[in-house]
Amino acid sequence: MAYSDVCKQSLLYEGELVPAMVDGKEIVIMWPDGGKPKAYEAACPHEKVSLAKGDFNGRILCCIAHGWVFDGHSGKCLHPEGWKMKEYPMRIENGMVQVDISGE
């Protein structure tokens, strides 16, 4: 695995969505209320619209283009069903959030 630094851990807050770029790829770090932060590809599986500009209320993320709704804890699409956001391995090392997109 090849982890890349994304941001300082101090920039992450529960209930928020943090957009970032890793090696030229747009990702989002989503930290749902009562959950753990996770890294996902920022492209909506529907038409690849950026989810970095989506509406995240701490529980669900809504795509601004066509209203697809994703669970903040799992990345699973709630509407319509049958889809899921692509998750990347993430860790926190020495106060830095790191993400591995090498499986691309």
Image (cartoon, rainbow, N blue to C red):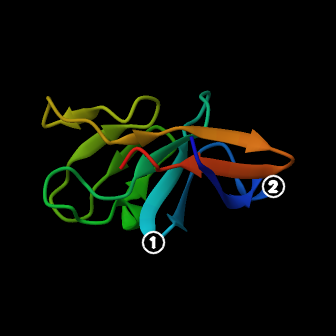
| Local SS, label 1 | loop
Judged left or right of residue 95, residue 30 is left
- The residue sitting at 13% across, 37% down in the picture is 80
Tell me where residue 42 appears, x and y as whole percent. Answer: 37, 58
Residue 75 on image: x %, y %: 37, 36
Compare residues 57 and 52 and report the one nearer the observer: 52
* Residue 60 drawn at (x, y percent): 39, 41
Quadrant location of residue 38? top right
- What residue appears at the point 21 percent right and 61 percent down from the top-left corner? 48
Residue 36 disc label: none
- Whether the residues at callouts 2 and 1 have beta carbons within 8 Å, the answer is no
Q: CA distance from mark 2 to mark 1?
A: 23 Å
Of the residues shown, which amino acid type is indicated by label 1? Gly
Q: What residue do we see at 67% from left, 39% from top? A: 91
Mark sitting earlier along the chain (2/1): 2
Establish if 98 lies above or below 52. Answer: above
**Residue under label 1:** 24
Q: How many neighbours does mark 1 have within 10 angstroms: few (below 14), some (14-19), or many (20 or more)?
A: few
43 sits to left or right of 8:
left
Whole-percent x, y for residue 23 in the image? 51, 67
Q: Quadrant location of the N terminus?
A: top right
Q: Does 42 appear above or below 76? A: below
Q: Which residue is mark 2?
A: 10
Image side of residue 54 versus residue 68, left or right: right
Type of amino acid at the residue the image marks with label 2: Ser
